[in-house]
Each structure stands twice: as C-alpha cells, then as structure tokens.
Amino acid sequence: MRNVAKKTLFLLIIVSIILSACGNEKQEEVEEDLDNLNKEGFPIVDEPIELNFFAGVGTVDNDWNDILLLNEYEQMTNIKIEWEQVSADAREEKRNIALVTDDLPDVFYGTYIPDIDLLKYGERGTFIPLNDLIDEYAPNLKAIFEEYPEIEKSVTMADGNIYGLPRIYDPEFISRRFGSKPWIRGDWLEELGIENPETTEEFYEYLKAVKENDLIGDGENREIPLGGASIVRIVDWIQGAFGVGTWGRMHTTLDTDPNTDELRFYPITDDYKDMLEYLHKLYSEGLIEENIFSIETDQYLANAAQGLYGATPFYNPKDLFGEEEGEKFISANALEGPKGHKLLTGLVPPVRTMGQFSITKANKHPAATIRWMDYFYGEEGSKMFFMGIEGETYEETPDGPKLLDKITNSEEGLTRLQELSKYIIEPSGNHPVMITEEYYVGPEAEPEDLEAAERLSPYLIENPMPTLPYTLEENEMMSTTGAEISKFVNDNRDLFISGEKALSEWDEYVRTLEDMGLEEYMEVQEKAYERYLDN
C-alpha cells in the first residue's frame, strides 16, 4: 500500500508540473446543440442525453443510479445521470486525481471543492464560468441572486466569475443558519429559584449553584454545569457578550470593530482577552466540563442522555438527548457582558460553501446541465428534493405538504431522515440547493428550535460575513502563514482557558503573532475585504 501511495503521489506531482507549465490556457468553448434544448418547462431536452456526475455522498449509502427521486426526474427531463458516488474519506483524493489528470466528469457534485481550487481550475479552463449560463438558463437561481445580492457576491471569485453553485440557507430560515443554540435546564432553574440568566455574572452564579447542589439527587454530584461537544460551541455562545466575533461562525480571527466599523484581528484585542479570563474563571472553578478540549460527540451525547448538563450549546435537545431528558431544557439567553455587549455571533451567512456543483470543460451540454440543477433552487423543485414524490413519501394537506406515516413512523425504527433517504438523495448532505423552513426535515425545523431562534433573533448579528474572495497569490499566503496564525490563535485560546498558559503571558502571545507575519496577513485580508465590498 505504501508503494501504491508513493506512485500516486509521484503521478500527481508530475501531472501538476505539466498543468502548471500550461499556465492559464483556456479551452475552446463547447458547441452545444441548443436546438435540442427547451429553455423553459419539461422535458429539458427533446432527445435524451446522458451526463456523468462525480458525487460526494452523505451519511446514507444508497445507489443514486436507481432511486425514486432521480428516476422520476429523469422521466421529467429526458436527462439520464450516471452517478459515480465516492465516500467521504476518499472524496478529496479521487477528486484531486481527476482534476490533475484531466480525467473529468461532466459535473463535480457535492464534493466540497475548496475556493482556491475553484479559482485555480476555473482560470485554467477546467471549470467553465457559470455567470452567463445562470443569466440565461437558471431563472430560479437568478431570482435568488436578485432578491439577495449578498448571495451572488458570496459565490463570485476574485476574477469576477462564478465557477461553482452553492448550498444556500434561505436568509429568512434563521433557525437553520443559527444551527446549534444555547439551552439551559428549566427544571433546575425552577428548583434553584433562579431566573434564566441575562448576564455573564448571573450565568456564573447559576453554574456555581448547579455545581454546589445535588440536583440529580443521587448523592454523587455528577452534574456538569456547562458542557458541549467542543469548546468552540461554548465560545460561540459567550464571545458576543464581550463584543468580539461579530462576523459570525465562519471567521475566527476577523471582524469589524463595533466602535469604528474598521476591520480588525480581534484575537489580540482587550475584549477578547476579557472573554478568555471569564472562560478561564469558569473552567478553573470546575464549571465547564473538564475534558471539553478533547470530548468526542458520542461521549457528549451519552452525558446529555443521562441528564448531566446544566447548560449546553447544541442542536435540538429533544431530538438528540432523548425525549425525557431533552424536554427539560429551555432556550437560554443571549448574555450581556461587563461592558454592555449582548450579541449572539454563532450565525452563518446564507452561503457557507460555493463549490458544490461545477461544470467541467468535458461537458457537451452545459446549458441543459444548468437547467437540470436550477429546478431544485425553485419552490417545486425544492419540495421534490427534500420531501420526495407526492403519494409515495408525502401528501398535500391544508397546512402544506406532510410526510407520510411510513416515513415519520418507520417500521424499522429509523429516523425520518434515514427512512426518507430510501426515496431521495440523503437530504442532510451538502447538496447545491436552497434550504427553506417549509420543506426542511432536519432538527432546526422542529418547534423548539424555531421558537428559540425567534426569541433570540433580536440579539443575533445581522450580516455574518462569507468567505472572502482571495486571488490565487493571496490564497497561497492564507494557506501557509494564515493557517499557521489561525492554528496558533486556536491553540492558545484553549491554553489560556484551561490555565496551561497564564494570561500574564498575553504580551508575549501578541508579539509572537506579530513575528509570524500578522501585518502581512492583515494586508491580504484588507484587500480581499475591499474586493468583496466592490463585487
């Protein structure tokens, strides 16, 4: 196996050298038979055509070449898709081999193509620009762009082109964009005679009370005042109380200063230091789960199912902790910090990743292909994509489409998503579609999540920032110096919170970042930020 890996690596290096020598040579435009194409309605083409898609699969292992949703859509469109499904652990390697060897499918679908590769292979001509195709043949996506210009800006690369279609969270579907939310034990608040904490100090007092009282009642004091699946989720909840992280969940080093509205590297600000001091206080007093820096999700969920947590940021508790324990949680508050900040920053922009549907130069039918995908960005296509086929998986009711009993009450004891995935292409995967509250079947559409999101929405940041559009040269810097800086910040965050590094070493921490190239890093970020604003 080691020799095979070496040979593969050698092949990749050789082909990369060859492609680099080719530079940015553009391929000739594809001559498509537009006489066979219907610009509106179905079928998309009069005479059947066949396309091959390289697809990254989700968590459910089903054959997309023979599944109800896609079989039905093939009949509607006259377009047959040959799906090459690739498992998550092999997706990146196989995708990269296909790219560097020029052994291309017609489409890369749901394969998490990094932004730098979208731009690199777009400029080489491997991926074709989609701007004009969207304008002419993708009315649903074009309508989304027109209603939400920030979405179009998010998917436009530094050279002005769009090389990949995105997975979009409906900007109005706040519960899904919020994702994991803060929860607190309502029964323990009542038992302790404490109101739902509104400030960081009140939250501290609640956590202390949980630690000091045998609320489970077994005499073992097993209660964990504050826990989570990672320290990052706790930071997401707390940092807004200290006025940092105002660009949202996708940016862990950048935001804009609330006082000056200028771009800043917030992990060296006094407010960020204050947040670390607060979290260190909680951790040092045993109020945060001891193994929070290394806990596995399975262990976290097992603890939650035993009713150990007094507060936690995560997804729907009833869905994931079990009905009995989950219903004890209520929505926690956005906390007000010592300087009056009261924000929740754990929000993502409508576009998280853009490289989920890229058409390659090998595709002889790009207009038909973009039409095939665009249907699922519209209302009827979205309903079909997420809920399946009427009469087979759902029925229409006066209150809207409802999944059939065989889906919601699986005879095999499967979840809704697992049962539904027998009929559709696993809806929780990273598909290039628009996720709306109306048709989404994940936990964020549950009543508890929707209610929590509505209650907390006044404190959510308004415009979380998407990934900035870097040039190839800037991307190289970000993947080296930028990556090192981000890792150093995250490592030291954990060290400061745990106490393994004293906050008296703060000045040395800042000097080290400056020596690592912080000034150059921020120059690149400034240029990319200005480019985003100008798009």
Image (cartoon, grey):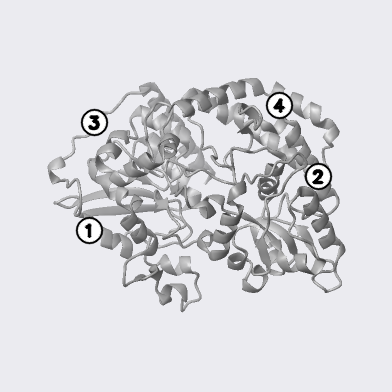
Q: Nearer the viewer, mark 2 or mark 4?
A: 2
Q: Residue at x 76, y 64 (%)?
A: 189
Query: Under tag 2, what secondary structure?
Result: helix
- Say which of 46 and 149 sits in front: 149
> Closer to the N terminus: mark 1 or mark 4?
1
Amino acid found under the numbered disc labelled 2: His
Query: Under tag 1, what secondary structure?
Result: helix
- Say which of 474 and 245 sits in front: 245
Q: Residue at x 38, y 22 (%)?
A: 23
Q: Estimate how packed mark 2 is, as few (under 14), some (14 to 19) or many (20 or more) residues with alpha carbons within 10 Å.
A: many
Q: Nearer the viewer, mark 4 or mark 3?
A: 4
- The reply to whether callout 3 and callout 2 are in contact (CB within 8 Å) is no
Q: Is residue 161 left or right of residue 185?
A: left
Whether residue 489 is visible to the viewer of this picture, yes or no, is yes
Q: Estimate how packed mark 1 is, as few (under 14), some (14 to 19) or many (20 or more) residues with alpha carbons within 10 Å.
A: some
Instruction: Tell me the residue that label 1 is attached to.
Output: 76
Residue 202 drawn at (x, y percent):
79, 53
Label of residue 29 in the image: 3
- Say which of 31 and 324 sits in front: 324
Residue 196 drawn at (x, y percent):
73, 59
Report, in whole angstroms, how far the alpha carbon at label 4 lies from the one at label 3. Answer: 47 Å
Amino acid found under the numbered disc labelled 1: Met
Label of residue 280 in the image: 2
Amino acid found under the numbered disc labelled 3: Glu
Query: Under tag 3, what secondary structure?
Result: loop
Residue 116 drawn at (x, y percent):
47, 32
Residue 279 drawn at (x, y percent):
78, 45
